[in-house]
Image (tube, rainbow, N blue to C red):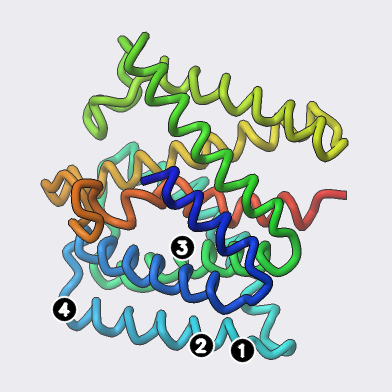
Amino acid sequence: TALALLLVIVGCLMVSSRLPFFIFLSLMFLAAQWEWLRLLKASTVAQGSAAILMLGALIWLYHLPAQYTSFWQRLPLIATLVWLVLVPFFLYTKKRIHPVLSVPFVLLLLLAALYSAWRLFQIDRQALFALALLVWIADIAAYFAGKAFGTRKLAPTISPSKTWQGVYGAAAGVLVFALALAHHTQREWLALTIACLVLMAYAIIGDLYESLLKRQAEVKDSSQLLPGHGGVFDRIDALLPVLPMGYLIISWWP
């Protein structure tokens, strides 16, 4: 399904119109929000309120007036700090977000990723594709390295199947990707490699956090929206922290 998602993204990127990609993003993030709040045991009222807020934000974003861009531009940085500080705290302590804060917490992280993907689609589609490809390569490399060599558990109480050998495999795959990307874009290879490895670390945090939520909710998948493959959140968990961080790196890159 990761490959299928990547192919859909490629198809949307090749279309000149903005609307198909925005519809794809909207459906994906609405589904992920519903699944995420279910894992957090949010009430039906909270889920409905979040859906209305997300729909309003989507309409606002698509018709974004120039005078309101400063609000959206702050979201990637705030979300990046949340993924860097608060989410690792949850992973370490196994604590849950307070129910009162579940809706703003989920909305913040989803809208930051949504805005980052939408802006990159508008300003640099190749960069957006590269971010998705990086996450896919890291995921595939981690899977095969973990299967072949995995012995030392990464987070046994959160996701027993993940190993440090899988992380090393992901790092190796991302290193090759970064060097190829540096050659293709004529960017300085060391800085680009470091950036890609940092993004890989963020992807792992996103993956582990969703695994923690599923373990706390005592479910295998976030939903069954994709029969045989779980839910949408299962497919984009690693992308959610990578998109805002990637957007910041690309925006600040000289």
Q: To which residue does mark 1 refer?
A: 63
Q: Are marks 4 and 2 in contact (CB under 8 Å)?
A: no
**Residue 93 % position (x, y):** 29, 40
Q: Residue at x 62, y 31 (%)?
A: 197
Mark positioned earlier in the residue sequence (3 or 2): 2
Q: To which residue does mark 2 refer?
A: 59
Q: Are marks 2 and 1 in contact (CB under 8 Å)?
A: yes
Say what amino acid the circle numbered 3 marks.
Leu
Q: To which residue does mark 3 refer?
A: 109
Say what amino acid the circle numbered 4 marks.
Thr
Q: To which residue does mark 4 refer?
A: 44
Q: Residue at x 44, y 33 (%)?
A: 139
Q: Are marks 3 and 1 in contact (CB under 8 Å)?
A: no
Q: Is residue 143 left or right of residue 13?
A: left
Q: Residue at x 65, y 29 (%)?
A: 177
Give the distance between the C-alpha atoms of the residues marked 3 and 4, in whole angstroms. Answer: 20 Å
Q: Are marks 3 and 4 in contact (CB under 8 Å)?
A: no
Q: Within 10 angstroms of label 3, few (less than 14), some, or many (20 or more) residues?
A: many
Mark positioned earlier in the residue sequence (3 or 1): 1
Mark positioned earlier in the residue sequence (4 or 1): 4
- The secondary element bearing badge 3 is classed as helix
Give the distance between the C-alpha atoms of the residues marked 3 and 1, in whole angstroms. Answer: 21 Å
Say what amino acid the circle numbered 1 marks.
His
Give the distance between the C-alpha atoms of the residues marked 3 and 2, in whole angstroms. Answer: 18 Å
**Residue 210 % position (x, y):** 31, 47
